[in-house]
Image (cartoon, grey):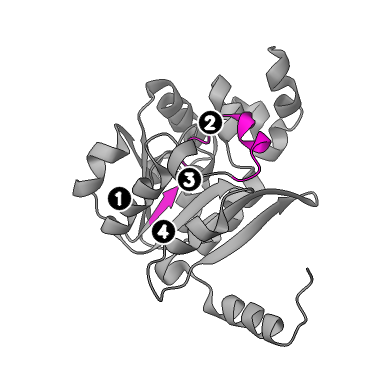
Amino acid sequence: MPKEIEKYYFQRYAYFSKFDKGVLMDKEGWFSVTPEKIAEHIALRCQCDVIIDAFCGCGGNAIQFALTCERVIAIDIDPVKLHCARENAKIYGVEDRIEFILGNFFELAPNLKADAVFLSPPWGGPSYTEADTFDLRTMIPGDGMYIHKLASNITPNVAYFVPRNTDPQQLASLAGASQTCEIEQNTLYGRLKALTVYYGDLVNWNKVESVEMEVMHGYTEV
């Protein structure tokens, strides 16, 4: 096993609780799959009829979406990743609720329709942690800002899974003038793993208003 994958392998059950049932992953998948507990939480937040997983990879998120949504459109440009996702969905018994599409989201987006879009484009491998601030525009292949624009043309209901050190000003600007987004910290075993940013009707307004009240009254920890 390659040295750089060892630490991810030791966490394999955090990525897929059914790993021993025959879960398939390619090398990049070890770096990019969403931990299962976090994927479960995001799926609950994104419950709807039809959701698009625009960069499905080995299927961690698509599988969880299939448990909370009526239909999942799972897209990836890599046939190996798509094969892994399909086989993993079979292990979880949800393959019949997922439409797997081999293709480029950039090209497919103008013709897609859905109630929500989930974005988790490649972050460029583990090296993203070395940057003080992760720049969506320059550090995500194809421009992470443009990717959000493509998704928001399908529906305003977008969930964006990004590195924990992503520029919050960039994330807020994607909501548009006078609009609100919700930036959620995703933790696992007490450690901050990533951020999920919710736009449109995916925003939990009760939670946002609660945080705003805490800030106004000086109760938020710094």
**How crowded is the residue under tag 3: few (<14 C-alpha within 10 Å), some, or many (20+)?**
many
Q: Are marks 3 and 2 in contact (CB under 8 Å)?
A: no
Which amino acid, mark 1? Leu
Point out the frontmost of discs 3 and 2. 3
Q: Label 3 to label 1, Cα distance in Å?
A: 14 Å
Residue at x 52% of width, y 56% of height: 43
Tell me where residue 206 appears, x and y as whole percent: 57, 81
220 vs 23, nearest the viewer: 220
Q: Is residue 41 left or right of residue 171?
A: right
Residue at x 38% of width, y 52% of height: 148
**How crowded is the residue under tag 4: few (<14 C-alpha within 10 Å), some, or many (20+)?**
many
The mark tally for this picture is: 4
Closer to the chain start, of discs 2 and 1, is 2
Which amino acid, mark 2? Gly
Q: Which residue is mark 4?
A: 158
Q: Are marks 1 and 4 in contact (CB under 8 Å)?
A: no
Q: Which residue is mark 2?
A: 124
132 vs 81, nearest the viewer: 132
Numbered tag placed on residue 136 in the rendering: 3
Which amino acid, mark 4? Val
Element class at badge 3 = helix
Image: magenta residue range: 117-133
Q: Label 3 to label 4, Cα distance in Å?
A: 16 Å
The quadrant of the picture occupied by the C terminus is bottom right
